[in-house]
Image (tube, rainbow, N blue to C red):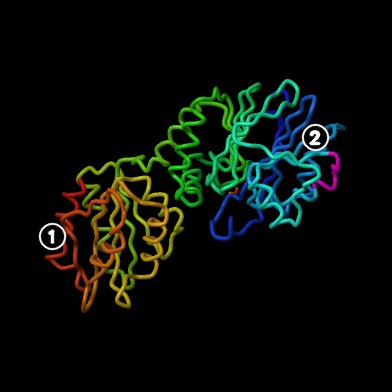
Amino acid sequence: MNITESIFYIGVNDHNIDLFEGQYDVPNGMAYNSYVIKDEKTAVMDTVDANFGDEWLTNLENALNGAAPDYLIVQHMEPDHSANIIKFAEKYPQAEIVGNAKTFVMMKKFYGSDFSDRRITVTDGQTLSLGSHTLTFVFAPMVHWPEVMVTYDSTDKVLFSADGFGKFGALDTDEDWACEARRYYFGIVGKYGAQVQTLLKKAAALDIKTICPLHGPILKEDLGYYIGLYNTWSNYDVESEGVFIAYTSVYGNTKKAAELLKEKLEAQGCPKVAIADLAREDMAESVEDAFRYGKLVLATTTYNADIFPFMREFINDLLERGYKKRTIGIIENGSWAPTAAKTIKAKFEKSKEITFTETTVTINSALDDQSTAQLDSLAKELL
Ligand code: FEO
């Protein structure tokens, strides 16, 4: 696949993976992207996952069409991109490995070699000329590892964006970009909003016509849409008006309250109400929805003097990603000593710009007139 006249796609699709990065469900698989820039000198941009080394080398060979690569540029050392560095280096002994100081420290740890006799160690902003193409390396630490750098080709105006602008899903499946890019972003990069903002500011100074990420489709049109979403996400801003109700329920009573709140909100014209059973639905999907909407309702039971385990995990997921700028309402349920609301509020104690609704719904085992009236108040407040 040609991206420009001299840039070729040589990545692979993975439909065998069970969990990406050991935890994320990827129902439509995963793509590990890699590219070749052909010029007087030929550069290869990253490798692919360990299971696809042979397929990738075949793609590379086809794209090279008899030429030999001069450089392997390593933008990110996470093994989904770096696993075939050794294979590549053995097959093409004349090629030099390009990375930064941190890249080579990690390379030695992962693969036992840092290629001290055939490497180019670049600094932030350094350029590499391939002939008519000039590549500029822009360091992007913590997007999503410390050694990450992105690469700008000023000739074809292509930004090779490493994990940035990536998404779950193989390239041979047709699905909405934002849905799986948002789940990917908040799952994997979400903690590093400040660092993504720094990268976006650097990128704003560049004339970009194409974004080539390491996962997901190559972006060629309407780049403002994708960059705008990345700006919203990394700034922790609200993307969509609406309420997300996340609940756990043991015998169905908390679920009933969560669903009744949804009905009340919808009846009163709330633009969007999303709801999820945290024990049964994909946790990363719930994390993404919590960041997408401006209002979050947490409905759970008191459990072992804490809260129900799936809710505890969900809140931890939000906290470790710096959840902020949101309104939270609580529905607590307890049969003899309901303390979930107090426990939840304590968990968010150090969070910035979190507002709790005045109304907390307290259910004593099952909904009654009093707790149903509290649901009405909560719905009004959320609207
Ligand atoms: Fe796709 Fe951070 O690796």
* Percent of width and height locating residue 223: 51, 28
Image quadrant of residue 303? Answer: bottom left
Of the pair 215 and 353, the residue shown nearer to us: 353
Specify the quadrant that holds the N terminus: top right
321 magenta-colored:
no
Asked if residue 93 lies in the magenta stretch, the reply is: yes
Q: Nearer the viewer, residue 335 or 205?
A: 205
Rendering coords of residue 345 (x, y %)? 26, 62
Q: Nearer the viewer, residue 212 or 245?
A: 212
At a point 46% along the width and 44% down the height, the residue shown is 182
Which mark is on residue 112?
none
Instruction: State the residue at coordinates (27%, 51%).
Output: 354
Residue indicated by mark 1: 373
The residue that mark 2 highlights is 70
Q: Which residues are magenta?
A: 88-94
Kind of element beneath mark 1? helix
User: Quick check: 66 left or right of 304?
Assistant: right
Q: Amino acid at mark 1?
A: Ala
Of the numbered discs 1 and 2, the one sitting upstream in the chain is 2
What crowding class fits label 2: few (fewer than 14 Cα within 10 Å), some (14-19), or many (20 or more)?
Answer: some
Q: Is residue 359 above or below residue 200?
A: below
Cα–Cα span, label 1 and label 2: 71 Å
> Given the image, on which type of amino acid does mark 2 rest?
Asp
Element carrying mark 2: loop
Displayed quadrant of residue 338: bottom left
Q: Residues within 10 Å of mark 1 (few under 14, many from 20)?
A: few
